[in-house]
Image (tube, grey):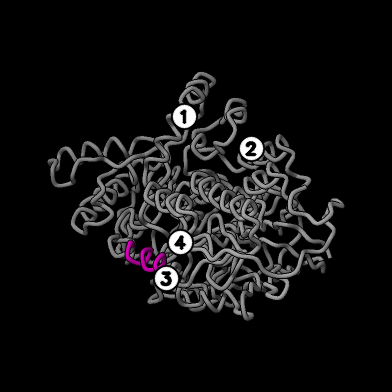
Amino acid sequence: MTHYEAIVVGAGVAGIYQIKRLADLGIEATVLEAGGDLGGTWYWNRYPGARFDSESYTYGYSFSRELLDEWHWKERFSGQPENLRYLNHVADKFGLRKYMQFNCRVDAAHYDEAQNLWRLRVSDGRELTCRFLILALGLLSMPTLPRVEGMESFKGQSFHTFHWPQEPVDMAGKRVAVIGTGATGIQVIGEIADKVGDLTVFQRRPNWSAPLNNGPISDEQMADIRRRYDEIFAACARSPGGFEHEPDRRGFYEVTREERLALWDKLYDEPGFGIWLANFREIFTDEKANAEFSEYIADRIRKRVKDPQVAEKLIPRDHGFGVQRVPMETRYFEAYNQPNVHLVDISETPLVRITETGLRTTERDYEFDIIVYATGFDAITGAFDKIDIRGVGGEALADKWRTTISSYLGMMIHGFPNLLMPAGPQSGSASTNYPRGIETGVNWCTDFLEHVWAKGYTRFEATEAAEKRWTDHVTGMYAMMLMRKAKSWFTGYNSNVPGHEQGTIRYLVYNGGSPKYVGIINSAAAKGYPDVSLGAGGAPPPAHGPMGVTSPTRA
């Protein structure tokens, strides 16, 4: 049985940086990745239109000046192929592949109290042990399919967007169905509408969306970005969401209606999340302010969609703009002006079943060559639930989190010693520009482990009281936000996952903003981690490491 001092699960954006930090310290560590290669979300999601909604230069890692200076982002919002090339470049540049094991799905991770070790069972049949287990699992990495009969009977091509084939999909002249109009569906529809024969979109609930306004980054612009990287990352650190967009400091009601409209017109035409995050802060907390802004966005949609009836079906009625993460779009609304694009409202004519030749609603049968399921994810906790994780006394994490989520700082769980989550539920990463959040989380976790090693500790566990305080704090932050009413993955809603339907709120994300979160976790570190029980425990680890290193702590 192979033993490591630390095992990282997941070779996405978080796992890549986590193994870089551990390798730099000489720690005997490995990464276990279920996929055939590294990249996480950018390895799996190859659907047309998949791209950043963060400015590319704010998404890349900030830990290496040399890396910042040598990489040229080609687009303001980079697409999946380039994003995957970037992550491969990072891994190759820093020699990280040798620490990674691919096609290694972790089926179980059980804490052994007597030995003070984690015992992992991997899909290839091996058993591994480690002192410290670091779960760098993707927040949106467990796709969900609709709860509809007959999916296996369809004779054409069909796939969830997460499992879009690696080889090109020929859509020219084809009859294509897209089920779902969330963030992914919006990207796919805008990209393929003019490339397919006929496109039918099946929508249950519309989502608010605003223009991405993407464009190329010239050599001159990239040179300027490189000069300003310190300033750019400082702006990200100041902003609540970790983006370069900062809220308008004026009060919503302090300015005139004309001034509000002028700001909104400006933001709507600018690139990225400015329309959401550089807006007045009251749109997130004040019902009246949010309603006025939502109506402004609704009017913009009406101007872009020629058929008034279709336009109204594309305007959400069950939530205001920005109370959940806003999908960014390119030519999405214009797609519905094309004669080959059709919108079916399945709240009026529900799906009955998938058939051999297409699908059936309560109104009629449709025939398709390709069915695309853009039906989202079992968000944030889905990847954790997929692994049989058991802590002290054999307690299953899936049971602990079944109805309510609890954690300490979103990075530790009481009852699960020696386990870290750099970007776990209730951490600052879930609601932020992800790489900015994961660098914060990975650095904090690694600094914590350095403290553990320096003091000679072999066991740590967040206290029950500290976990309760943090969970209460996270829950309290929801009370301030209109988000608390949304049917979204921010509140744990997913009609395709049993137990996550309407009426079950799960407090999954931290809504206090990045600066507040960073301040809290840095304060905990500065005080010597008073909310974490630290000590020794268990027998010495096995006397061999993966590269023949004896009694590994540091190679």
- Residue 404 got which mark? none
Query: From what the image shows, is residue 222 above or below residue 122?
Result: above
| In-image side of 553 versus 1 (left or right) | left
List x then y, in percent, for residue 487.
38, 67
Q: Earlier in the sequence, mark 4 or mark 1?
A: 1
Kindly identify the amino acid type of the residue bearing the numbered disc 2: Tyr
Residue extending furthest toward the right:
548
Q: Quadrant of residue 198?
A: bottom right
Q: Kindly identify which numbered label has been placed on residue 230.
A: 1
Q: Are marks 1 and 2 in contact (CB under 8 Å)?
A: no
- Distance between the alpha carbons at the discs numbered 1 and 3: 37 Å
What is the span of residues highlighted in magenta in the rendered image? 469-477
Q: Is residue 392 above or below residue 187?
A: below
Q: Which mark is residue 468?
A: 3
Residue 86 is marked as: 2
Q: What is the distance, in whole Å, between disc 4 and disc 2 at their CAs? A: 28 Å
* Helix, strand or loop for disc 4: loop
- Label 1 packing within 10 angstroms: few (<14), some (14-19), many (20+): few
Of the pair 67 and 498, the residue shown nearer to us? 67
Gap between marks 3 and 4, in whole Å? 12 Å
- Check if mark 3's residue and mark 2's residue have beta carbons within 8 Å: no
First along the sequence among labels 4 and 2: 2
What secondary structure is marked by label 2? helix
- Quarter of the image containing the N terminus? bottom right
Q: Secondary structure at mark 1?
A: helix
Query: Which amino acid type is shown beneath numbered disc 3?
Result: Lys
| Foreground: disc 1 or disc 2 | 1
Residue 317: x and y in percent read 30, 63
Q: Earlier in the sequence, mark 1 or mark 2?
A: 2
Q: Toward which corner of the image does residue 66 lie, by quadrant?
A: top right
